[in-house]
C-alpha cells in the first residue's frame, strides 16, 4: 500500500508563488508516474502536471510556463513549484501516485488547499 504525504499550499496573492511537495512511502513499483491534480469548488478534478519515473513531464495548458514539476526518485518525492499564480488556480491540490505493472494502481493524497487572492 502506497501512502502519500503532502505539504505546502496556503494563501498567496495573485502573482505570487507557492510550492507543494508529496512524499510516497511503501512503494515497490519501479515504473510509476507521480503528479498533481486539482479540484475547484463545483468543478471536476483536473490534471495539473505529471512526471514519470523516467522524468517525462506533462502539463495542463493552463499552467504551462508558470508551474514546474520535479521529482527526487531516491526520496520518492514529487514537487510542484507554482509561480505567477492566478485566482483561477485556487483549488484543492491532490498528489497522485500511479504504480505501473501490467495495469496501473492509483493512490491519492489527502489534498492541500491553495488559495490565490486577487
Image: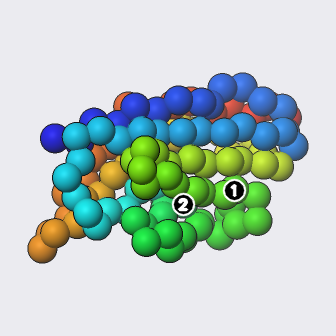
Secondary element under disc 2, as helix, strand or loop, is: strand
Q: In this view, does 44 lie above or below 50?
A: above
Question: From where the camera sits, is residue 42 visible?
Answer: no
- Is 101 situated left or right of 115 in this image? left
Give the image location of residue 44, x and y in percent.
Answer: 45, 51
- Residue at point 43%, 55% (across, down): 73
Q: Nearer the viewer, residue 34 or 110?
A: 34
Question: From where the camera sits, is residue 35 visible?
Answer: yes
- Is 39 situated left or right of 63 in this image? left
Q: Any mark on residue 11, and which?
A: none
- Is 60 situated left or right of 15 in this image? left
For disc 1, the marked residue is: 67
Number of numbered labels in the structure image: 2
Mark 1 → mark 2, Cα distance in angstroms? 8 Å
Neighbours of disc 2 within 10 Å: few (<14), some (14-19), many (20+): many
Q: Is residue 84 above or below residue 103?
A: above
For disc 2, the marked residue is: 49
- Residue at point 78%, 40% (across, down): 17
Q: Is label 1 in contact with label 2 (beta carbons under 8 Å)?
A: yes
- Which image quadrant: the C terminus? top right
Give the image location of residue 75, x and y in percent.
Answer: 43, 44
Q: Nearer the viewer, residue 92 or 96?
A: 96
Amino acid at each position: 500500500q502506497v501512502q502519500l504525504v503532502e505539504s505546502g499550499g496556503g494563501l498567496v496573492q495573485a502573482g505570487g508563488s507557492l510550492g507543494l511537495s508529496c512524499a510516497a512511502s511503501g512503494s515497490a513499483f519501479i515504473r510509476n508516474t507521480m503528479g498533481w491534480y486539482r479540484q475547484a469548488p463545483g468543478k471536476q478534478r483536473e490534471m495539473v502536471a505529471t512526471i514519470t519515473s523516467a522524468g517525462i513531464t506533462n502539463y495542463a495548458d493552463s499552467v504551462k510556463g508558470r508551474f514546474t514539476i520535479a521529482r527526487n526518485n531516491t526520496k520518492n518525492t514529487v514537487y510542484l513549484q507554482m509561480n505567477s499564480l492566478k485566482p483561477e488556480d485556487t483549488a484543492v491540490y491532490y498528489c497522485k501516485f500511479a504504480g505501473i505493472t501490467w495495469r496501473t494502481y492509483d493512490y491519492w493524497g489527502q489534498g492541500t488547499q491553495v488559495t490565490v487572492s486577487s
